[in-house]
Amino acid sequence: MYLVTFRLDPGEYDAEFHELNDAIQAAAEDTEGYLGKRTWHAPESEEILVVYYWESLDALESFGADSDHKRAKQRWTEWYDAYEVTITEVVEAYGTGFGDDADPPR
């Protein structure tokens, strides 16, 4: 499994951002190998972390080819004050007690 962590400092969102964001989420959900996402908001700042779960790098690369995703990446300065993407491979994941909130999201 691979995690893509999208760390962002939001700027001003407009209607076009929301439309494009919804299209990108739909494209992710339609990509074979997409496992889900989790979102966290930092309590002490505006910072947000969105973690996307992918079955494989091939699935992630397939999503990366989506035209809406490419367009959004080119326009990030219109909507974010800062962003950072980290891609990691999960070697092991375990735990108990989260029930339906266990990772990866289902």
Image: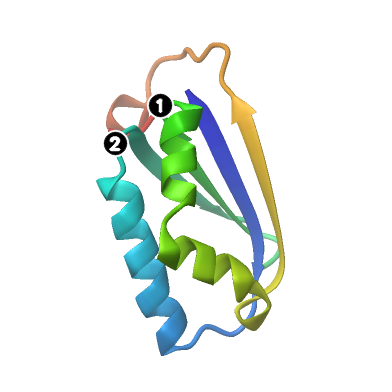
Q: Amino acid type of disc 1?
A: Glu
Tell me, yes or no, whether the two marked residues, 2 and 1, touch with CB atoms within 8 Å.
Answer: yes
Q: Residue at x 41, y 88 (%)?
A: 15
Regarding mark 2 in the picture, which secondary structure is present there?
Answer: loop
Helix, strand or loop under label 1:
loop
- Quarter of the C terminus within the rendering: top left
Residue 77: % across, % down: 68, 77
Image vertical order of residue 33 relative to residue 25, above or below = above
| 40, 5: nearer the viewer | 5
Q: Residue at x 44, y 45 (%)?
A: 38
Q: Up-down: is 30 above or below 42? A: above
Looking at the picture, how far across and down is residue 96, in whole percent? 40, 15
Residue at the spot of label 2? 32
Per the rendering, the mark at residue 55 is 1
Horizontal and vertical percent position of residue 83: 70, 61
Label 1 Cα crowd, 10 Å radius (few <14 / some 14-19 / many 20+): some
Q: Earlier in the sequence, mark 2 or mark 1?
A: 2
Q: Amino acid at mark 2?
A: Glu
Which is nearer the eye, 31 or 98?
Answer: 31
Q: In 3D space, how far apart are the residues under numbered discs 2 and 1 (Cα atoms)?
A: 9 Å
